[in-house]
Amino acid sequence: MKITVLGGAGKMGGIAVQTLANDPRVDEVVIVDLNPQAAREVADFISSPKIRIASIDLRDHEVLVAALKEADAVVNATVYYTNLPVMRACLEARTPYVDLGGLFHTTRKQLELNDAFQEAGVAAVLGMGSAPGVPNVQARYAADRLDRITSIRIYDGIKPPPPDDTSFTYAVATILDELTMKPMVFRDGAFIEMEPLSEFEDYLFVEPLGVLPMHLSLHSEVATLPLSFADKGVQEVFFKINYWGMAPETVEKVRVLAEYGLNSTEPVEVKGVKVAPRDLMVALLREHEPPATAFLAPPANEPPNWTKEIVTEVWGEQDGRETIYRLGTMTVKGALPTGAAPAITAIWLAQGRIPPGVHPPEQVMAPEPFFAELKKLGIETRVSVTRPLD
C-alpha cells in the first residue's frame, strides 16, 4: 500500500506521515512538499525506510495528476484553499482522497463533486482530522443509538499555553480565517452567521484540562451534521474551541492587526511595490510556527506533551426518554488526532472500505473500529450516557 501525503513536511502532515510509516499495512509513504529541506528534516526525524520525498507544485495540474496516479490514497494536509483543485486532480487520477477540513464554505463546494466521484468510482472523505473529523464520528456513534436528536454540541479543548507563548498551533492562514470569518451555527433548522469569538461559555473537560473558556469558531462539522442527521430532527449544531489552543493574549494581538487592515487581500502600494497586507502578515507570523518535528514522537517513542479532549454532546431521545450522549476523545502525550485520523482514513480508502462518492466522516467512518485504531495511537475515547431516573 502506497500513501501520498501532500504537505507532508507540515505540522499535521508530518504526524500523518509518521502514523503511516509506523503502520504495518503501509509499504510506502511519499512526502510531497515544496520545501525539500523541511521534508528531509521530517523524514530524517521519523527515520523510516518506507519514506521517500517528492517536490511538486500543486498548481501544476498535469504533474500532480501523474504523481497521484501512483498512490493508493492521498492525504491532503496542505492549507484548505487547495482542497478543490487537489480533489479534481484525484478525480482525474482515480485516486481516493482525504483532507483535514474546509472551514464550512469550502466543504460545501467540495460536496458538489459527489456525482463526479461516484461516476468515476473514486472515494473521498472530507474534514477527517482532529476537528472536524473526530466529532463527526462521535456524533455518528450517538446518532446510531438515538431515536431523535435535538442538539449536537462540539467542544474542542486544548491545554492552554503560558501567556507569553506567541506560537501558532497550526497553519497561520487557517487560524487567521477562523479568527476573522463569521462562524456558522445551525439553530431552529436554519444556518445562521454569528460573530467571531462570540457566545463564550465555560465548559468542564476531564482532568488535567478542567474548566476552559469556549467560543464559537467557523468549522466544517456544522456544514454536514445537520444534513446527515436531518431525519433525526436535529435542530442545533455548533462548534466551540478555546482560542485555537493559543494564548488569549496572542489571539488578541492578531485580532488587533486584522482590525487595522493587515488581514486584507487588497494590494497596497509601498514604495512602488504592491503588497497584499495579508501576505505580509502571514509571512511574519509564520516565524512563530513551531517546526513540524516538534509535533512528532521521538524515535524512542516517547510522545510529545499533548493534552487535548474533543467532546461531542448529542442531546436527544431514546426509547421515549430524554438522553444525552457525551463522547470525549482524549490525548495526553499521545499522537495528535489531527494527523492520525486522516492517516487511518487513507488506509481505509486504500483498502476499499469507503464507497465511491464524496462523504463527510459521519456517513462512512464506522465509529467503533475507528476509535479502536485511535486507541492504539494513545488516543482514547470514552462515552457517558445521561438520562432521567424512572
Image: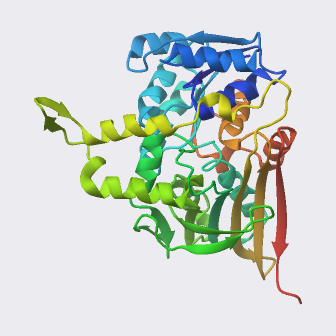
Q: Is residue 113 visible?
A: no
Task: Give 221 or 6, whichever is nearer the viewer.
Answer: 6
Task: Give 4 or 310, whichever is nearer the viewer.
Answer: 310
Using the rendered view, name the quadrant where residue 149 is placed. Answer: bottom right
Residue 353 image position (x, y, % from top left): 74, 32
State the quadrant of the C terminus: bottom right
Residue beneath the point at 55% across and 41% down: 170
Residue beneath the point at 49% across and 59% down: 249
Residue beneath the point at 55% across and 14% down: 37
Picture layout, residue 102 above or below residue 22: below
User: Is residue 153 found left or right of 180 in the rendered image?
Assistant: right
Using the rendered view, name the quadrant where residue 29 is placed. Answer: top right
Q: Residue furthest front?
A: 164
Residue beneath the point at 79% across and 43% down: 370
Q: Is residue 51 visible?
A: yes
Using the rendered view, name the quadrant where residue 151 is placed. Answer: bottom right
Display colour scheme: rainbow
Q: Residue furthest bottom?
A: 390
Task: Give 375 or 354, whichever is nearer the viewer.
Answer: 375
